[in-house]
Image (cartoon, coloured by chain):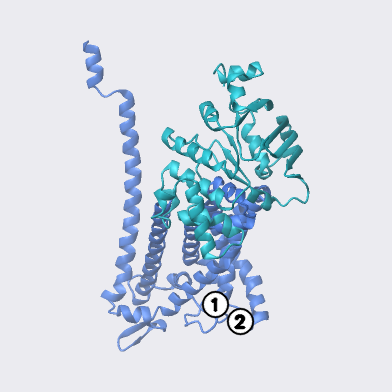
Chain colours: A blue, B cyan
């Protein structure tokens, strides 16, 4: 009797193991959270210094069109970030919009039209596209896309359009593979129900499959936009890096990321120039946060509809 | 004497090298309910899906034999498969309404057939829902998602959806196996009403259900059709030992 009593009261080996496992997971989780929070605080602290210690007004920063932190006018550095914000958004939206039809088309080939060829050929191709380092994309963009644009549209070739083309190729695999997931998650019996009602394959795809997959496809779009918005190197290589309001798609421009990568090595920590870059980083961070929230929102609404 | 509307002869079906149906000769009469029964994996659902060529969607399936539907071979080269599926509708085992409103679900078949006229659609939706005996339950929420309905209601919406295109034959693949007994009885009552206007072929696991609703019953076993006869004969006086063993629950 006492033996059973004792074994019940004392934690067993397995329950100790369980507790240890729980502890390890908890430590890993909390340290990751800590790092993320620390990064947030650090960037916010640095990014806000522009406004607190350098006394730049937030409105001037967001709406100003001249970016020249070395020059002071009326005691205020010229740090208008609008050209970069515009550049970033333009490239992101154009690249994703361009990629979307290709992504949906490719994804449909892989799921509904020729699933065999899709898994045999397209899947590896997509995975390969993801694996190519961004500097290689940038390099190809620099040697192929930029001269091409120069010949066709005139100008130097550098600019938003070149960035769009390069980013298009870079976000395509992300958007496509997520669209494929969305289409695959549409129950097969929707397709058979539609076909059994005398719908053609195209009608089935258009009226049932795509509609049922819409939340997933929207998520794919936002993921693609997040990737495009944050891409630095490849864009920086082809965008021209002129911190000017883009007057046309083929005029040299800049993005938040490209200004950051070109500028961050040339400034000293704590100076106005450096603080201004941190403010750009803060905008980037806030934007990716927004993208994440949008994704969560879409996912939630998608669940409700099901 | 009832009219034969659909007749199959020596139907064989292979998944790759595996022959799942070994030559089925079966005919179906107009305005009757025919039940296909048999143990799991006997090929009854596979056979059913041959009738509206749903098996075409599966890779590596080869089907041979004759399918005479109102004098025309369903598997003929020039047979319009879209037209065929409008004539021979299907209701599946799992209720599978589209993630749309009840109205859009029922109107779907007509819309893909090019019907745009609002009045025609309204009328067809109402008639089909009434025929499927669900109108009273959903008439106030036609614009609500069909997914919010209970399983039995969903299945009757699916039946209404199949009826809306005014098919000639309705195929049902174990339409009540995913439903509770009460919903099943409602579906059965619906089917009995529907046979006035339609020819119904149903696969069922439930022998009592076959006995209750079917005019004729066909017993499948391991890819063979053992016998097909009036339901009464199958249950009271089967010609084959396998049939009586199955009916009395000795296997399956």
* Quadrant hosting residue B36: top right
- The residue where tag 1 is placed is A240
Name the residue at 46% across, 53% down: B102
| Secondary structure state at the residue bearing disc 2 | loop
A226 left or right of A1 in image: right
Mark 1 or mark 2: name the one nearer the start of the chain. Answer: 2
**Is residue A150 among the parts visible in the rendering?**
yes
Q: Is residue A24 above or below residue A43?
A: above
Label pair 1/2, CB-CB below 8 angstroms? yes
Quarter of the figure that contains the N terminus of chain B: top right
Q: Is residue A305 above or below residue B252?
A: below
Quarter of the figure that contains the C terminus of chain B: top right
Q: Chain of mark 1?
A: A
* Quadrant hosting residue B72: top right
Gap in Å between the C-alphas at discs 1 and 2? 9 Å
Give the numbered dot on residue B45. none
Q: Where does the image place residue B63, in percent across and percent down from the top left?
A: 74, 38
Q: Where does the image place residue A276, in percent across and percent down from the top left?
A: 36, 74
Local packing at callout 1 (Cα closer than 10 Å; few below 14, some 14-19, many 20+) is many
**Is residue A132 among the parts visible in the rendering?**
no
Q: Chain of mark 2?
A: A
Name the residue at 56% across, 71% down: A164
Give the numbered dot on residue A156. 2
Q: Where does the image place residue A246, in percent across and percent down from the top left?
A: 50, 82
Local packing at callout 2 (Cα closer than 10 Å; few below 14, some 14-19, many 20+) is some
Q: Is residue A87 above or below residue B72?
A: below
| Secondary structure state at the residue bearing disc 1 | loop
Q: Residue furthest top?
A: A1
């Amino acid at each position: 009797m006492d033996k059973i009593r004792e074994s019940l009261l004392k934690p067993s080996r397995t329950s100790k193991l369980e507790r240890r496992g729980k502890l390890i997971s908890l430590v890993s989780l909390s340290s990751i959270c800590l790092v993320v929070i620390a990064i947030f605080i650090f960037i916010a602290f640095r990014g806000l210094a522009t406004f607190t210690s350098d006394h730049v007004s937030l409105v001037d920063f967001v709406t100003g069109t001249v970016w020249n932190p070395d020059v002071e006018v009326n005691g205020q550095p010229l740090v208008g970030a609008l050209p970069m914000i515009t550049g970033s958004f333009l490239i992101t939206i154009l690249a994703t919009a361009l990629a979307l039809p290709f992504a949906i088309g490719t994804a449909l080939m892989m799921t509904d039209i020729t699933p065999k060829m899709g898994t045999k050929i397209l899947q590896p191709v997509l995975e390969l596209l993801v694996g190519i380092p961004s500097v290689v994309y940038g390099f190809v963009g620099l040697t192929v896309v930029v001269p091409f644009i120069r010949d066709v549209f005139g100008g130097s070739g550098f600019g938003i359009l070149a960035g769009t083309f390069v980013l298009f190729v870079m976000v395509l695999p992300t958007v496509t593979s997520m669209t494929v997931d969305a289409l695959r998650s549409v129950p097969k019996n929707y397709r058979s129900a539609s076909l059994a009602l005398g719908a053609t394959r195209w009608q089935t795809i258009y009226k049932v499959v795509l509609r049922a997959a819409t939340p997933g496809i929207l998520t794919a779009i936002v993921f693609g936009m997040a990737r495009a918005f944050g891409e630095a190197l490849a864009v920086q290589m082809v965008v021209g890096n002129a911190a000017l309001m883009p007057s046309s798609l083929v005029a040299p421009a800049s993005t938040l990321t490209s200004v950051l990568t070109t500028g961050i090595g040339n400034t000293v920590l704590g100076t106005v120039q450096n603080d201004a870059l941190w403010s750009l980083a803060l905008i980037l961070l806030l934007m990716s946060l927004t993208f994440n929230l949008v994704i969560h929102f879409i996912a939630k609404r998608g669940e409700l509809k099901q | 004497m009832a009219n034969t509307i659909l007749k199959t002869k020596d139907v064989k079906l292979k998944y790759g090298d595996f022959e799942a149906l070994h030559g089925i000769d079966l005919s179906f009469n107009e305005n009757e309910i025919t039940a296909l029964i048999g143990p799991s994996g006997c090929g009854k659902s596979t056979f059913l899906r041959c009738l509206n060529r749903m098996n075409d969607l599966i890779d590596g399936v080869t089907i041979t034999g004759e399918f005479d539907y109102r004098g025309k071979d369903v598997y003929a080269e020039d047979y319009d498969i879209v037209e065929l599926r409008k004539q021979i509708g299907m209701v599946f085992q799992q209720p599978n309404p589209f993630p749309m409103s009840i109205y859009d679900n029922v109107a779907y078949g007509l819309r893909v057939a090019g019907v745009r006229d609002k009045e025609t659609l309204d009328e067809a939706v109402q008639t089909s829902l009434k025929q499927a005996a669900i109108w009273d339950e959903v008439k106030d929420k036609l614009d609500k998602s069909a997914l919010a309905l209970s399983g039995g209601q969903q299945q009757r919406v699916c039946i209404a959806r199949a009826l809306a295109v005014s098919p000639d034959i309705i195929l049902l693949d174990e339409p009540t196996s995913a439903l509770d007994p009460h919903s099943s009885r409602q579906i059965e009552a619906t089917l009995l009403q529907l046979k006035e206007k339609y020819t119904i072929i149903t696969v069922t696991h439930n022998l009592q259900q076959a006995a209750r609703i079917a005019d004729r019953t066909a017993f499948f076993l391991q890819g063979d059709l053992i016998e097909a006869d009036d339901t009464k004969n199958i249950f009271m006086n089967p010609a084959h030992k396998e049939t009586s063993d199955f009916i009395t629950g000795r296997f399956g």
